Image (cartoon, rainbow, N blue to C red):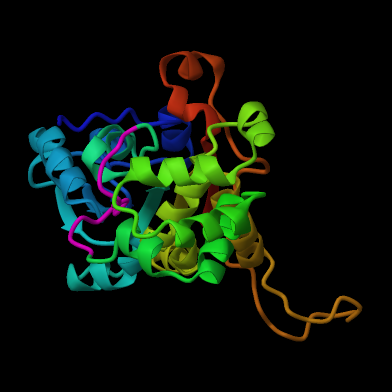
């Protein structure tokens, strides 16, 4: 399947990232290369782009899309959470800007065999990195009812988490997404199925997050990203659900105000200095024109900070 991916909040992201000619930038979730292409246009010819993605299909697609800028970019199959090691291996001490476009891509959702969608009946998978051994199949069929409850409750914010987990365990083994959807439908009361979104949506989100360790790695990755920025360098992060956005917001706040002194201490004695300036007082969202053309932008939120 051709890798189709429309970059969300493109103009807003470029405005906050502010790529300059000759600069060095990292796209930590390069996807199909939409954002990266525009970054390369801005930094060419002396600039350099490092593109990272855990999905081998994204690396292949980005390589083709960016081909006209050959020599100005370097692609890495890896995880943005390893950004410090990746840059160290490339002998890059610091960069001018970093972009992270989080979550599952349109291509991953629209490729049935990847198992991200609850609208298809395929083998349970949900791996962003197809070379990773652990998949949704192992999680669904091996995790305890308690662990499944925690994942579905915390990562999916699902009211019926315990009931869904119990039904999953009772009906194991489950081989396909279609089988999982049917079990979820059995677990969720009829009234909730009628009044809310698709009954499997929250559970599928939760399982995907757990399989790919999306939230577990995020805060550390944000801190590492800021660490490898040059002074004045910028970090832009696009999120697609409240759990991600909350981590980004809270991490940015703690980097802006790292003081750990007790609230009533008259003078700061911890000597912790602010690391960043937050550029987005509120998250930036898509305008009506973009929403008409790209429904995926509906839930997108952009936050940005600048290293002091």
Secondary structure predominantly adopted by residues drawn in magenta: loop
Q: Residue at x 32, y 34 (%)?
A: 120
Name the quadrant containing residue 276: bottom right
Q: Which residues are magenta?
A: 120-132
Q: Residue at x 24, y 29 (%)?
A: 4
Magenta span has 208?
A: no
Q: Give percent across and percent down for residue 159.
A: 67, 49
Residue 286 left/right relative to 72 = right
Q: Give percent across and percent down for residue 289.
A: 49, 13
Q: Give percent across and percent down for residue 278.
A: 61, 52
Q: Give percent across and percent down for residue 200.
A: 50, 41
Check the picture and name the quadrant holding the C terminus: bottom right
Name the quadrant containing residue 283: top right
Q: Can residue 40 be seen at all in this image of the molecule?
A: no
User: Residue farthest to the bottom?
Assistant: 269
Q: Can residue 119 be seen at all in this image of the molecule?
A: yes
Residue 128 left/right relative to 280 = left
Foreground: 266 or 202?
A: 202
Check the picture and name the quadrant holding the N terminus: top left
Q: Residue at x 46, y 52 (%)?
A: 234
Magenta span has 129?
A: yes
Name the quadrant containing residue 39: top left
196 lies above or below 164 = above
103 lies above or below 166 = above
Residue 126 left/right relative to 243 = left
User: Residue farthest to the front?
Assistant: 170
Foreground: 62 or 296?
A: 296
168 lies above or below 178 = below
Q: Residue at x 17, y 61 (%)?
A: 131
Foreground: 268 or 181?
A: 181
């Amino acid at each position: 399947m051709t890798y189709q991916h429309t970059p969300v909040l493109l103009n807003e992201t470029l405005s906050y990232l502010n790529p300059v000619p000759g600069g060095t930038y990292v796209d930590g979730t390069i996807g199909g290369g939409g954002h990266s292409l525009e970054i390369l246009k801005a930094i060419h010819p002396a600039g350099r782009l490092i593109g990272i993605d855990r999905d081998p299909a994204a690396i292949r697609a980005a390589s083709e899309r960016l081909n006209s800028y050959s020599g100005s970019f370097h692609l890495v199959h890896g995880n943005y959470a390893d950004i410090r090691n990746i840059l160290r291996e490339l002998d890059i001490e610091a960069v001018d800007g970093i972009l992270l476009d989080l979550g599952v891509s349109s291509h991953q959702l629209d490729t049935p065999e990847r198992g991200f969608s609850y609208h298809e009946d395929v083998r349970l998978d949900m791996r962003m990195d197809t070379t990773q051994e652990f998949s949704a199949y192992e999680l669904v069929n091996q995790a305890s009812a308690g662990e499944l409850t925690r994942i579905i409750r915390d990562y999916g914010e699902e009211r019926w988490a315990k009931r869904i987990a119990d039904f999953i365990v009772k009906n194991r083994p489950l081989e396909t997404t279609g089988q999982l959807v049917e079990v979820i439908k059995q677990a969720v009361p009829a009234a909730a199925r009628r009044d809310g979104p698709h009954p499997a949506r929250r559970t599928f989100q939760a399982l995907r997050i757990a399989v790919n360790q999306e939230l577990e790695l995020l805060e550390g990755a944000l801190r590492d990203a800021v660490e490898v920025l040059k002074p004045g360098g910028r970090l832009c992060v696009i999120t697609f659900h409240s759990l991600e956005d909350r981590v980004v917001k809270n991490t940015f706040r703690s980097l802006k105000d790292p003081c750990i002194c007790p609230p009533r201490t008259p003078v700061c004695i911890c000597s912790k200095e602010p690391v960043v300036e937050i550029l987005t007082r509120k998250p930036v969202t898509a305008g009506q024109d973009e929403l008409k053309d790209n429904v995926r932008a509906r839930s997108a939120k952009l936050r940005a900070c600048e290293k002091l």
